Image (spheres, rainbow, N blue to C red):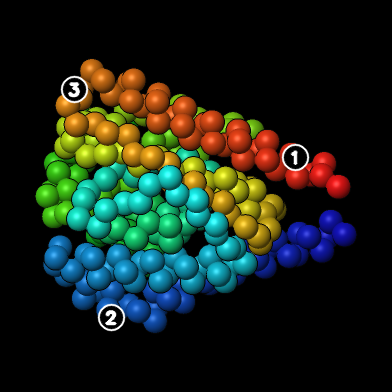
């Protein structure tokens, strides 16, 4: 039985990369045209959402979204979520309709084909370089001025220890939100680690629950407030993760 599971997981993981590639190849000319100018980004974003939904559907994932508050189409936001899986990017694109730009680590730009568009559309950061971190603020300001939102996974990466429910948050997202006076939108992904973690021989098709929380306002806040807001947002996501886990445990023992 274990041998069959290993075969399934191996083929399933390979299938994931096939699914990543197919829509990029199909839409390649249109994707390239959409990134020639910054004004074309909203069109690129629409195609990115198609790409994301194609992958989720092809992997057998279906998502259920619960909202406390809607996002206004004419407003910029700082979108933050917990980070546990490669499919976090796809699920974020499928969940949020407002065009946004990811702030992510530059290492992802080395992924063939995907990296070509990633480095041309996302705000890349080298966390080992202070100059790179400062450049993020300037690029984010430019994108916000264009009416776009920003998306950051504030844990700064996926914890090596998968037993960690939620890692500590870094300051960057909250400094940006306060400096640009944009609301913070906390989002909780409940099942991504279980469905498709970084452990190769693991995962399965199934539901991915998403919770979009009420916005945390930053208007009138100053830089010194960032740690309080950071911990407030982390507490919101952490509490929701615990609630999801408790609900799952209750369902296991329900008759």
Give the number of the disc on residue 222. Answer: 3
Is 184 placed left or right of 142 in the picture? Answer: right
Is 176 placed left or right of 18 in the picture? Answer: left
Label 1 or label 2, whichever comes before in sequence order: 2
Displayed quadrant of residue 132: top left
Rendered residue at 43%/57% (across/down) = 95
Taking 95 as reference, is 44 above or below it? Answer: below
Element class at badge 3: loop
Element class at badge 2: helix
User: For this rendering, which residue is in front, 169 or 209?
Assistant: 209
Residue 209, horizontal then vertical, whole percent: 56, 51
- The answer to whether the residue labelled 2 contacts the one labelled 3, judged by CB atoms less than 8 Å apart, is no
Give the number of the disc on residue 29. Answer: 2
Residue 133 appears in the picture as rendered: no
Taking 22 as reference, is 113 above or below it? Answer: above
Rendered residue at 57%/71% (across/down) = 58
Label 3 or label 1, whichever comes before in sequence order: 3
Residue 61, horizontal then vertical, whole percent: 59, 63
Q: CA distance from mark 2 to mark 3?
A: 44 Å
According to the picture, the residue beneath numbered tag 1 turns out to be: 250
Mark whose residue sits in front, 1 or 2: 1
Residue 89, horizontal then vertical, whole percent: 43, 54
User: For this rendering, which residue is in front, 206 or 236?
Assistant: 236
Rendered residue at 55%/69% (across/down) = 57
Residue 77 appears in the picture as rendered: yes
Residue 105, horizontal then vertical, whole percent: 35, 44
Mark whose residue sits in front, 3 or 1: 1
Q: How many residues crowd around disc 3 within 10 Å: few (fewer than 14), some, or many (20 or more)? A: few
Rendered residue at 30%/65% (across/down) = 45
């Amino acid at each position: 039985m274990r041998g069959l599971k290993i075969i399934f997981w191996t083929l399933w993981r390979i299938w994931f990369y096939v699914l990543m590639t197919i829509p990029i190849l199909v839409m390649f000319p249109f994707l390239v045209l959409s990134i020639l100018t910054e004004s074309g980004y909203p069109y690129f974003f629409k195609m990115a959402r198609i790409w994301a939904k194609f992958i989720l559907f092809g992997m057998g994932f279906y998502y259920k979204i619960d909202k406390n508050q809607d996002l206004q189409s004419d407003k910029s936001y700082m979108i933050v979520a917990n980070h546990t899986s490669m499919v976090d990017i796809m699920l974020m694109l499928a969940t949020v309709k407002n065009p946004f730009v990811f702030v992510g680590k530059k290492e992802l730009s080395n992924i063939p084909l995907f990296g070509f568009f990633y480095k041309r559309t996302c705000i890349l950061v080298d966390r080992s370089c202070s100059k790179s971190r400062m450049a993020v603020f300037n690029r984010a300001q430019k994108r916000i001025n264009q009416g776009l939102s920003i998306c950051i996974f504030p844990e700064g990466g996926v914890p090596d220890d998968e037993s960690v429910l939620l890692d500590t948050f870094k300051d960057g997202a909250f400094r940006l939100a306060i400096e640009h006076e944009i609301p913070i939108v906390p989002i909780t992904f409940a099942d991504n680690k279980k469905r498709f973690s970084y452990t190769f021989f693991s995962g399965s098709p199934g539901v991915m629950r998403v919770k979009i929380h009420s916005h945390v306002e930053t208007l009138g806040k100053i830089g010194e407030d960032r740690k309080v807001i950071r911990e407030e947002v982390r507490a919101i996501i952490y509490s929701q993760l615990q609630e999801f886990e408790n609900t799952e445990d209750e369902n296991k023992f329900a008759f």
